Image (cartoon, rainbow, N blue to C red):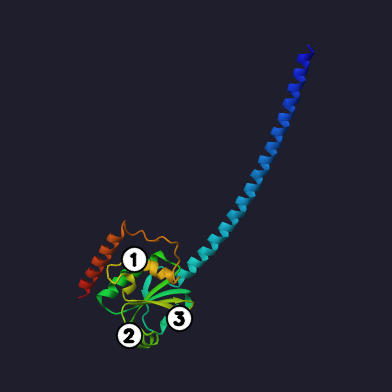
Amino acid sequence: MENSKIQEILEKQVLTVAKAVEDKIDDDIAALDRLDLDDLEALRERRLQQMKRMAEKRSRWISLGHGEYSEIPVEKDFFSVVKASDRVVCHFYRENWPCKVMDKHLNILAKQHIETRFVKINAEKSPFLTEKLKIIVLPTLALVKNAKVEDYVVGFDELGGTDEFSTEELEERLAKCQVIFYEGESSINVSKSSAQTRRSVRQSARADSSDSE
């Protein structure tokens, strides 16, 4: 009889201890849940602020002509363009086949890299700039950061020496100068393969050339 009572008491004590442990665990979990919610709320607030700042930047970039590949009509406007935007890619061109190839790639990149202004200017109508910047070979890209020309892409020599280079290859070259934001993978999704990109760009540019003649 005594053994049964002892057993009953022990069971009650075990249950009491188990209940206390369970309550403690529940309290700890609740505390962790509250901590996680606070952390998530703080992360959410920071993310919202980042998104707000990015939206403001995008709005400003678009107002300056970012997102499009446009032409500078007169050379004096070159200076206001490079002063207004932190990053500018300027294509010095003439009406020839190589420059039309470059146009096609830059038109794609302008839409992919809204953080950078992509423009073109007729070198033959811009004698002051071509002399000042020593532009000889066309096409030449002037890569401008903070109103200063940091680098040049002259012709196709750095792009494989052929007009069949891909948009991705040009994108990587621009990224070396940090004139575009680049994560290590191409941001371009305009084709399923670089070979298709090269063929379509070349065929389209030739069609434009034939239409203009």
CA separation, marks 2 and 1?
27 Å
* Amino acid on which the number 3 mark rests in the picture: Ser
Q: Position of residue 153 (x, y in %)?
A: 36, 75
CA separation, marks 2 and 3?
18 Å
Instruction: Give residue 123's quadrant in the image.
Output: bottom left
Q: Position of residue 138 (x, y in %)?
A: 31, 79
Compared with 184, 87 (above or below) is below
Residue drawn 41% across the image and 82% down it? 77
Q: Does residue 149 appear to the left or right of 201 in the view shown?
A: right
Q: Is residue 51 visible?
A: yes
Please tell me the numbered disc located at residue 167. Answer: 1
Q: Residues within 10 Å of mark 1 (few under 14, many from 20)?
A: many
Q: Does residue 26 appear to the left or right of 53 in the view shown?
A: right
Q: Residues within 10 Å of mark 3 (few under 14, many from 20)?
A: few
Q: Position of residue 96 (x, y in %)?
A: 25, 77
Q: Secondary structure at mark 1?
A: helix
Q: Residue furthest top?
A: 1
* Amino acid on which the number 2 mark rests in the picture: Lys
Residue drawn 70% across the image and 39% down it? 27
Please give the residue where the numbered disc 2 appears in the rendered image: 125
Query: Which of the pair 160/155 is nearer the observer?
Result: 160
Please give the residue where the numbered disc 3 appears in the rendered image: 80
Q: Secondary structure at mark 2?
A: helix
* Amino acid on which the number 1 mark rests in the picture: Thr
Query: Which of the pair 59/51 is nearer the observer?
Result: 51
Quarter of the image where the N terminus is located:
top right
CA separation, marks 1 and 3?
28 Å
Instruction: Give residue 195's quadrant in the image.
Output: bottom left
**Mark sitting earlier along the chain (2/3):** 3
Mark closer to the observer (2, 1): 1
Quarter of the image where the C terminus is located:
bottom left
**Mark sitting earlier along the chain (2/1):** 2
